[in-house]
Amino acid sequence: MCGIAANVGEQILSLLGYNAGCLPVRYLGVPLISSRLKGSDCRALVDRIIARAKSWTCRALSYAGRLQLVKIILFAIQVYRSSIFILPKAVIKQIEQTLRAFLWKGSDLSTRGAKVAWEYVCLPKKEGSLGLRGLEEWNRAAMLKHLWHICTDKEQSVWSSWIRTHLIRANNFWELKIPGECTWAWRKILKLRPLARANFKFRHPLGPLVERYGERLIYDSGLGRNAVVGAITNGAEWDWPTAPSMEWMEVKNATPGDFKPNPMRDDFLQWGGDPSGRFSVKSAWESIRSRGPEVEWHRVVWHKKAIPPHAIILWLAVRNRLNTQEKLCVHGIISEVRCVLCGQGVEDLDHLFFSCPFSERLWLLLCDKCNLPWIQRSWVESVGWMIQNSKGKSLKSLIYKRMFAASVYAIWRERNTRTFQDKARHVSSIVYDMMFWIRVKCNTLHGLSPSQENRWLQRSWGISEDVFWPW
């Protein structure tokens, strides 16, 4: 209680039977604070994410399984809080550290041994990454929703109405200076305006003149900075400024004679980050996120019919992030680099895929199923060949991509089984499993053309004839 004497406050509490409290208190799951948000205020959020990550104790979870848990569950825990506050950087760092540790090491949450730097993991798949989102960028995108409500939600929201009435008043929101004394939350919202302004588009015939014509024209006209296009209209006719300005004359002459203002239309704002003009957090994130170059191989790794455990191992191989013996030797972890599959060559990516006699035999057995001639190539050349020869949506292209990913996955798994469990499987047994994986996925297709090539592949792989039905 504020603004009253201490003895008066005690009397009120005594009469009402309440106890005096202090900020911060929790309301609707978030802390109510009178100062800036501190790391201690978000401790419960961080602890909840850590506890949830540690609850999945099954060591059999693959990278692909943990990736789905990070995307769907762990990341979602912070979404509500991120849409209300700008989270402190220390909190964002703790949360991302937990997500990164769980992705690469599981529920142990070890911070060592990440395969790929987190900033590269948080890029779209077409840019060669896993499609996660950076928490800081997502937090800012979610907060842009408040700016959108301030500018567009004229009557429905009590909060936005209060902001316009008591904080913005008659000022231009975009030009409003950050007050020396204002709440931490309001200051953070005002600091987001440069991010929003690039995508907030006022539409003619009504709206700020600055957005329509630029600051120089407004200065020449003698109108105020907050003037709207309605200031140069008179009903359904134009009322151009009389200022002796060449720029204004150019605007007047460039306006078609049949283009008249519509006084019955209200101001409206469009979000430039989406073709529909409607704001969404997803499109806001897309407009402000970090970007990387698009990679050609993403269609080979992340196509719609990809098997997730296969895809992520192939992704690591393409990025040269598999811990082969050759790489471990370079870092001084081991001294022997002999391939465990053939017992002869040096185990690196070129040898494993597909120069090793064991892996070459496995790959050639699959190539025979496609009547595909194959010559020995380096790993980089093999990836390039697959990019060029698996384009399109034909059954052949789909089988090429699936058997490529399945081969990399099966070879790497067999290598690990022999290295850590001292168990070995025959090539024919591994190929049988791979054909089963590919066949099951292909059986989910429908509406394929019953061409001679597709018929031959369907019989060769044992795929159901239902794939040719239109339903």
Image (cartoon, rainbow, N blue to C red):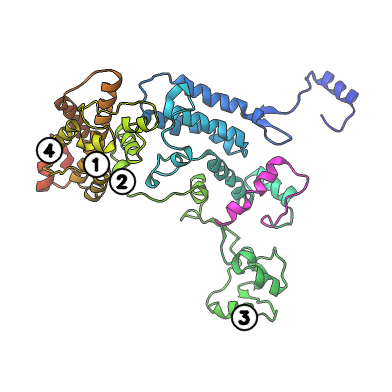
Callout 4 secondary element: helix
Q: In which quarter of the image is residue 84?
A: top right
Crowding at mark 1 (Cα within 10 Å: few <14, some 14-19, many 20+): many
Label drawn at residue 207: none
Residue 301 x/y as whole percent: 31, 41
Contact, CB < 8 Å: mark 1 with mark 2? yes
Q: Give the range drawn in magenta.
A: 173-199
From what the image shows, is residue 273 above or below residue 305? below
- On the image, numbered disc 1 is attached to which residue? 401
Q: Position of residue 73 (x, y in %)?
A: 46, 30
Q: Please tell me which of labels 2 and 3 falls first in the chain.
A: 3
Q: Residues within 10 Å of mark 4 (few under 14, many from 20)?
A: some
State which tag comes first along the sequence, 1 or 2: 2
What amino acid does circle 2 point to? Arg
- Amino acid type of the residue tagged 3 in the rendering: Met
State the residue position of label 2. 299
432 or 83, nearer to the observer:
432
* Among numbered discs 4 and 1, the one appearing first in the sequence: 4
How many angstroms separate mark 4 from mark 3 (CA)? Answer: 74 Å
| Quarter of the image that includes the N terminus | top right
Secondary structure at numbered mark 3? helix
**In this rendering, which labeled residue sits more in front, label 3 or label 1?**
1
